[in-house]
Amino acid sequence: ANTQGLVAGGLAGLFWSLCWAYAGQTFVILSLAEMASMAPTAGGQYHWVSEFAPPEHQKLLSYISGWLSTISWQSIIAIDSYIVGVMIQGMIVLNNPEYVPTGWQGTLFIWAAVIGIALFNIFAAKRLPLAEGIFVTVHVFAFFPVIIILWVFAPKQSAAEVFTVFTNSAGWPSTALAVMVGQVSTMFVVLGSDSVAHMSEEIQGAATIVPRSMVWSFVLNIPMTFGLLITYLFCIGDLQKAISSPTGFPFIYVFQNALGTTGGATALTAVILLLIIMITISSLASTSRQTFAFARDNGLPFSSWLAQVHPKWHIPVNSIIFTCIFTMAISLINIGSTVAFNAMLSLSTTALMGTYVISIGCVTWGRYKKRQFPHAQWSLGKYGFTINVIALCYATWSFFWSFWPNNAVVTPQNFNWACVLFVGIIGGASVLYFFHARRVYDGPVAKVRTVY
């Protein structure tokens, strides 16, 4: 996820954009955590919009948020599976320079990855809490060996090069504009802490535990992310060689350049690959719950099938299967071209930021209008409105820059097709809403009112 930032912004651009991405995302996470405490449900953002939007706009805004959230999380699974598959190809290239990776082979690796991860989520669902604990342990204990090895063996950049030298290899009129475009890399890195919200219905005491988990998972990753990034930037070596590495991943070049051996670089890459697989297992669990929840409220086609819970395993197996099929279908694009698939990478950031803008915007408007919100066991108190406004500004800022192409000279090959996909999805969802969904989709709040 860092190549775009290295091309448009360079070493300093990547570092400083991570600084303001974390600063802005902090307010977003705080806002989402409070909403998760007010309404701890698997639906997440679309449920919160249904709860907090002005009554006259609640139904449509909730529906759009549900579609954006579904697409963003489905795209994240596609991205993670893509990274796993292509990283395996990169390891093959590392060990066999004569190997020429092809799109169809990469797609088969993607299929193998997502099928294996889906099977884990189905048959090992009861072991998911234990697996999460193992994931955290591996995450922490894998961090230090990688950092130490790079600092000991890799050639070093100067501090001036890392923190003050911005580069513009993307052809933009100014380096400042290049940095703005390249910051999408760091935006994607800081996303995802709200994923636990979609597991709310399987957690006891969710109104307290979920917001705490969201905030602490975000906060505890900050020093580790900066530690890894600073190490990576100091040890990257020749920037252009790293970007153009035949493995497709600059960090694999860094490992090989530091250790000077293929075996050592392969071992460190395998550690990173294992961590990404673990992340994808957790992400797929959250994604399937979000899809299940939206289908339960009749927000998606084939909702009755997607909303089914397996009678024996008590998990939304059909939503897991759908997530697997979605990734497999999208990965077919990789056979012919990586352009459209890369657009899905930007789309995941854009769509998720769109849900942040709508949900936080509704809460901000409600606070401005002095509306009475449900009690939150984890509350922002008197600072709520200020935090919400800052979060809304950052989410809007990120949403805007997510549509930009990485290169100034735009061609069909490097155009950021996320804007086309985004408009297409919103347009399609709107058509579906006006011709069908508005008669069957009322939003979760309407159901709550009906019951109580």
Image (spheres, rainbow, N blue to C red):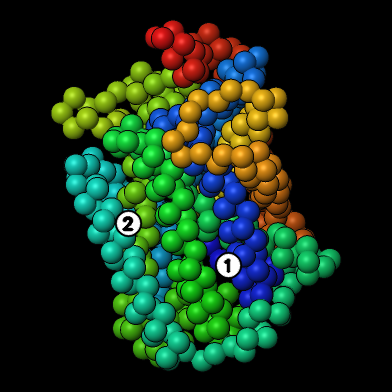
x then y, percent, for residue 352? 56, 42
Left or right position of 152 against 271: right
Q: CA distance from mark 2 to mark 1?
A: 22 Å
Residue at 36% over, 18% down: 304
Label 2, residues with CA under 10 Å away: few <14, some 14-19, many ≥20: some
**Mark 1 surroundings within 10 Å by alpha-carbon count, few (fewer than 14), some (14 through 19), many (20 or more):** some
Q: Residue furthest right?
A: 173
**Which is more toward the observer, 378 or 360?**
378
What's the mark number on residue 278? Answer: 2
Name the residue at 52% across, 51% down. Answer: 191
Q: Is residue 73 visible?
A: no
**Residue 313: x and y, percent?**
18, 32
Residue 135 visible somewhere in the drawing? yes
259 vs 74: above or below: below
Please state the horizontal and vertical placement of residue 189, each as a whole percent of the image: 52, 58
Task: Determine whether the residue tagged by mark 1 lies in a helix, strand or loop.
Answer: helix
Viewed as shown, does residue 240 lie left or right of 119?
right
Disc nearer the start of the sequence (2/1): 1
Indicate which label's residue lies in the foreground, 2 or 1: 2
Q: Which mark is residue 46?
A: none
Q: Is 10 rendered above or below residue 220?
A: below
Choose between 369 and 310: the one closer to the eye: 369
Q: Indicate which disc residue 3 carries.
A: 1
Q: Quadrant of the C terminus?
A: top left
The quadrant holding residue 125 is top left
Q: Is residue 111 above or below residue 323?
A: below
- Amino acid type, callout 2: Met
